[in-house]
Image: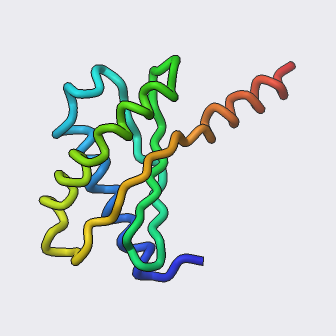
């Protein structure tokens, strides 16, 4: 169970990372739509697990690796945005959110 502080910080990071993907790193990842679906923050606010949905991508693992290699740059951009709201800029760890793929797979099975 996350504290209110963690929840507020998670929402702040989710909003800012989404804007970074949308506006500041637009050309870096090509024409891929990256959606930040969820952010989980550690109790000390030092680590943020960021779940992203990638569309339309066939090889999500390769794209996730590119995002992970860019995490230092993304963290720097995040630091510039939230420097007055947070004392520590968390370490960013990216994961693929495959819940939409899972739901689609279940729906296809139910149609059969």
Q: Tell me: residue 6, above or below residue 103.
A: below
Q: Position of residue 84 (x, y in %)?
A: 13, 74
Residue drawn at x 21%, y 31% is: 26
Q: Position of residue 111 (x, y in %)?
A: 82, 22
Q: Position of residue 101 (x, y in %)?
A: 63, 31
Residue drawn at x 84%, y 28% is: 110
Q: Nearer the viewer, residue 51 or 112?
A: 51
Residue drawn at x 73%, y 28% is: 105
Q: Quadrant of the C terminus?
A: top right
Q: Quadrant of the N terminus?
A: bottom right
Q: Tell me: residue 44, above or below residue 90.
A: below
Q: Position of residue 43 (x, y in %)?
A: 47, 78
Q: Nearer the viewer, residue 10 or 104?
A: 10
Q: Is residue 61 left or right of residue 33?
A: right
Q: Is residue 84 left or right of residue 48?
A: left
Q: Is residue 8 left or right of residue 53?
A: left
Residue drawn at x 51%, y 20% is: 59
Q: Nearer the viewer, residue 112 or 54?
A: 54
Q: Quadrant of residue 10?
A: bottom left
């Amino acid at each position: 169970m996350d504290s209110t502080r963690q929840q507020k910080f998670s929402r702040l990071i989710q909003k800012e990372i989404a804007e970074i993907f949308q506006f500041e790193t637009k050309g870096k990842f090509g024409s891929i739509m990256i959606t930040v679906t969820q952010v989980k923050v550690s109790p000390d606010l030092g680590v943020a697990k960021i779940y992203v949905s990638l569309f339309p991508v066939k090889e999500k693992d390769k794209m996730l690796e590119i995002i992970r290699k860019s995490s230092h740059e993304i963290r720097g951009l995040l630091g510039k945005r939230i420097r007055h709201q947070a004392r520590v800029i968390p370490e960013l760890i990216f994961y693929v959110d495959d819940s939409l793929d899972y739901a689609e797979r279940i729906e296809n099975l139910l149609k059969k």
